[in-house]
């Protein structure tokens, strides 16, 4: 196993030191078993070859040597490599392993597809100008070699928390790691001792997505595991950010993602790196990139204050919804008014004769209505000059009738030559769309031969 992990919820009887001591012994025991097992297989193969192959002359000796090396490789690949002993190790895809010479870093092995290291162990794209194009340590079927027993794979003791949405809570974890992901991963970070601008207590629960961009800085710059250091720095950044805002502002944000973006972009660096934000300092000093911050929950210590803020936010949403609804009703009323007024005006200007039958009259009215719509859209000034007074009379008549019939009155006037045209055209367009959605669109003849949907 390359990773020893255990959830520690409900296991308070075993402290941190005892846990890691037990896991270190477990790893050592598995490695010893792998060493003994592998050498036993190698010894058995050598014995069998001595008894049955080497006695067959030079051809037998050559065949025996070839078979021995194949068997030795298979033992390295399937027995020693998975336990990081006897010259072989396997970093998983997206992970890296540190190789120590004595107690000093020798190198890192393993890299994701499309990625490479620089000479300073920064993780960059393979086509980056600083990427190392060649390496003395080429993997064989994913297996890397190291100079055991002088070299060994680095192990680190790590303790952290992860938030589980399905459980709606975070769970602490302890890990004894021998490989380290270079991919983004979420870490739960909570701060419960911050105060806002008004000195109200604030608890912030967040998911912080981070990734290693320089394993040397992340793993070997300090004795403490990097999640512990970065978590403390982020909490300090939270405190600084919250001091400059209010609980009301945070709770009434349009989207909690806005808060996460603010935290990521505006948390000041708690160190002496002038002009740098916390995310820049963490990446430059510790080789950790803070990819994103997601706010899970923000809780005020003063319950009455938080209830008041929430009530205010809900009231604002209700008020906005009422205004939007009222505006929509007003617009609908205006559209209905314009549509009826245009139909009335069309009947006034249509070329009909009293002797025409009903079908012929309707056809003439429809043709006139289409003509008026086209003129409003394309020749607004001409429409205003030619039909403006008549149209206002029609609108006034329709509004009075609607006020009597439905108890509502919408003041709508034709646009002048300098402004207001957009509103009328917008209403015409909206009414056309509404008619289409309602399935009321029908084909009406036009002077130009183009169909124009009715209101």
Image: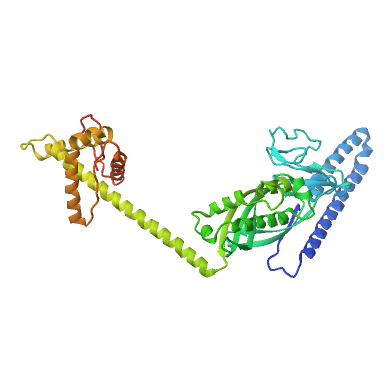
Picture quadrant where residue 428 is located: top left
Q: Residue at x 32, y 51 (%)?
A: 328
* Colouring rule applied to residues: rainbow
Picture quadrant where residue 434 is located: top left
Picture quadrant where residue 76 is located: top right
**Percent x, y for residue 113?**
68, 39
**Percent x, y for residue 134?**
77, 33
Quadrant where the C terminus is found in the figure: top left
Q: Residue at x 87, y 41 (%)?
A: 68
Image side of residue 248 versus residue 344, left or right:
right
**Percent x, y for residue 393?**
16, 44
Q: Nearer the viewer, residue 410 or 55?
A: 410
| Residue 92 visible in the picture | no
**Percent x, y for residue 350?**
14, 36
Image side of residue 19 versus residue 317, left or right:
right
Q: Nearer the viewer, residue 216 or 386?
A: 386
Image side of residue 443 versus residue 198, left or right:
left
Looking at the image, the residue that sits furthest to the top is 448
């Amino acid at each position: 196993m390359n990773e020893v992990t255990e959830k520690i919820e409900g296991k308070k009887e075993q402290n941190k030191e005892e846990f890691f001591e037990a896991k270190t012994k477990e790893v050592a025991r598995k490695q010893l078993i792998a060493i003994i097992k592998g050498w036993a297989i190698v010894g058995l193969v050598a014995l069998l070859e001595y008894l049955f192959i080497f006695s067959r002359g030079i051809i037998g000796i050559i065949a025996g040597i070839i078979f021995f090396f194949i068997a030795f490789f298979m033992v390295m690949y399937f027995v020693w490599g998975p336990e990081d002993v006897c010259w072989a190790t396997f970093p998983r895809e997206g992970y890296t392993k540190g190789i120590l010479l004595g107690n000093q870093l020798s190198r890192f092995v393993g890299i994701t597809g499309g990625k490479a290291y620089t000479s300073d162990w920064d993780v960059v794209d393979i086509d980056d100008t600083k990427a190392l194009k060649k390496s003395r340590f080429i993997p064989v079927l994913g297996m890397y070699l190291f100079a055991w027993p002088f070299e060994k794979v680095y192990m680190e003791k790590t303790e952290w928390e992860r938030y589980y949405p399905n459980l709606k809570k975070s769970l602490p974890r302890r890990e004894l790691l021998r490989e380290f992901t270079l991919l983004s991963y979420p870490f739960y970070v909570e701060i419960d001792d911050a105060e806002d601008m008004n000195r109200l207590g604030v608890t912030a629960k967040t998911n912080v997505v981070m990734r290693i961009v320089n394993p040397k800085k992340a793993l070997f710059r300090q004795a403490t595991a990097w999640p512990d250091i970065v978590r403390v720095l982020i909490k300090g950044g939270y405190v600084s950010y919250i001091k400059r805002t209010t609980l009301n502002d945070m709770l009434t944000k349009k989207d909690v993602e806005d808060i996460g973006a603010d935290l990521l972009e505006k948390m000041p660096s708690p160190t002496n790196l002038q002009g740098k934000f916390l995310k820049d300092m963490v990446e430059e000093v510790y080789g950790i990139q803070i990819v994103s911050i997601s706010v899970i929950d923000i809780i005020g210590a003063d319950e009455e204050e938080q209830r008041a803020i929430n009530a205010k936010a809900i009231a604002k949403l209700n008020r906005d919804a009422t205004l939007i609804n009222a505006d929509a009703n007003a617009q609908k009323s205006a559209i209905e008014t314009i549509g009826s007024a245009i139909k009335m005006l069309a009947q006034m200007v249509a070329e009909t004769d009293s002797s025409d039958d009903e079908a012929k009259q309707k056809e003439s009215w429809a043709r006139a209505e289409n003509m008026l719509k086209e003129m409003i859209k394309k020749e607004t000034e001409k429409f205003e000059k030619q039909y403006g007074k008549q149209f206002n009379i029609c609108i006034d008549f329709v509004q009075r009738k609607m006020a009597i019939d439905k108890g509502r009155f919408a003041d709508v006037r034709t646009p002048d030559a300098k402004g207001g045209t957009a509103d009328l055209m917008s209403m015409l367009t909206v009414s056309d769309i509404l008619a289409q959605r309602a399935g009321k669109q029908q084909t009406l003849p036009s002077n130009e031969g183009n169909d124009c949907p009715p209101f």
